Image (spheres, rainbow, N blue to C red):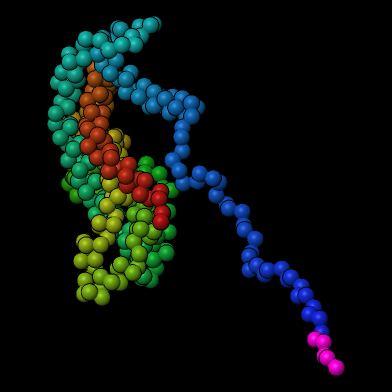
Amino acid sequence: MTMTSPAKVPELALPARTPHRAPKRASRFKPGAGKQLQGGPFAYIALAVVGIGSLLPLYWTLVAASHTQDEVLASTPPFLPGGRLMHNLDAAWTQAHLGKAIVNSFIVSSCITVATLFFCTLAGYAFAKMRFRGRGALMTGVIATLTIPPQLSVVPLFMLMSDLGWSGSLESVIFPTLVSAFGVFFMRQYLSEALPYELIEAAKIDGANNFRVVLSIVLPVARPAMMVLGMLTFVQAWNDFFWPYLALNQQNPTLQVALGQLSASYTPDQSIVMAGALISTLPLLVVFVIFGKRIVGGIMSGAVKG
């Protein structure tokens, strides 16, 4: 008797297992994000209009300073520069004594700028990274001073300068503006984001005191913001007219006060006044040409965070 083996049952083919994958989320960024944007015709037109509108007052000052008053005040004013520019510049320089006024303005603006950068950087660092009692209340008080019109403090400030014996001198213009509330707030906001606590703690572990921390860490980090604040402060001090006009006299004016005296006559020559305004603008243009790249770099460094 022979035994037969049972027939083999064919194995069923099972589907291959695939690893489970979570569904892809839609990207929040559009294709091409991070690439440099290309400007279209509308962007170029808008930039051209803004550029022309910004340069038009300066160009008109040049045109008016190179013509006679009759030509400037004619029913059809000139649109191209004339040939009396050097004559009008010399007349404005002589009549308003602009040489001494420019020196005074440079002294006042430089002292105010250096002092503002020093004190505002120190105060901004203290408010941003140091812990002390009453810090929030003091910062609120600093910001609150921005809401007070400067005209309200003119009378007591003038009396104080008179009691100190500084009436008519440059000290009366320099000392009241050695620090600004805006500068303190600006540096505080910048250092809060740009200066990490770990860097300060590492310096203190190495034995650095507060002065060394400020000199070696805070000032290099705050340099871009200091460039921007310095430019804004210098321009504001250079163009300031209200308080120097009250505090100084005709024998010791700043540039804007001297230009005010140039146009204070009964029938001022507008072409000479424009020539004086052109002289007052040239130093600011030179400063911006020299430091413009660093100033723009400082503004953009605060716009990129990463």
Residue nearest the observer in this picture, 104 or 275: 275
Q: Could you tell me residue 208's position as x and y percent?
A: 21, 71
Task: Report whether residue 252 is seen.
Answer: no
Residue nearest the observer in this picture, 54 or 105: 54
Q: Is residue 30 above or below residue 221?
A: above
Q: In which quarter of the image is residue 198?
A: bottom left
Residue nearest the observer in this picture, 269 or 306: 306
Task: Report whether residue 1 is seen.
Answer: yes
The rendered magenta stretch, by its main secondary structure, is classed as loop
Q: Does the magenta stretch include residue 95?
A: no
Residue in the picture at 20% in, 66% down: 212
Q: Quadrant of residue 274?
A: top left
Residue in the picture at 29% in, 55% down: 222
The quarter of the rendered structure image containing the N terminus is bottom right
The quarter of the rendered structure image containing the C terminus is bottom left
Residue in the picture at 40% in, 50% down: 304
Q: Is residue 216 above or below residue 167?
A: below
Q: In this view, does 47 lie above or below 191?
A: above
Q: Which residue lies furthest to the front in this view?
A: 1
Q: Which residue lies furthest to the bottom in this view?
A: 1
Which range of residues does the magenta coloring cover?
Answer: 1-5
Q: Could you tell me residue 84's position as x and y percent?
A: 21, 11
Q: Is residue 209 above or below residue 127?
A: below
Residue nearest the observer in this picture, 70 or 175: 70
Residue in the picture at 27% in, 43% down: 294
Q: Could you tell me residue 9's position as x and y percent?
A: 80, 78
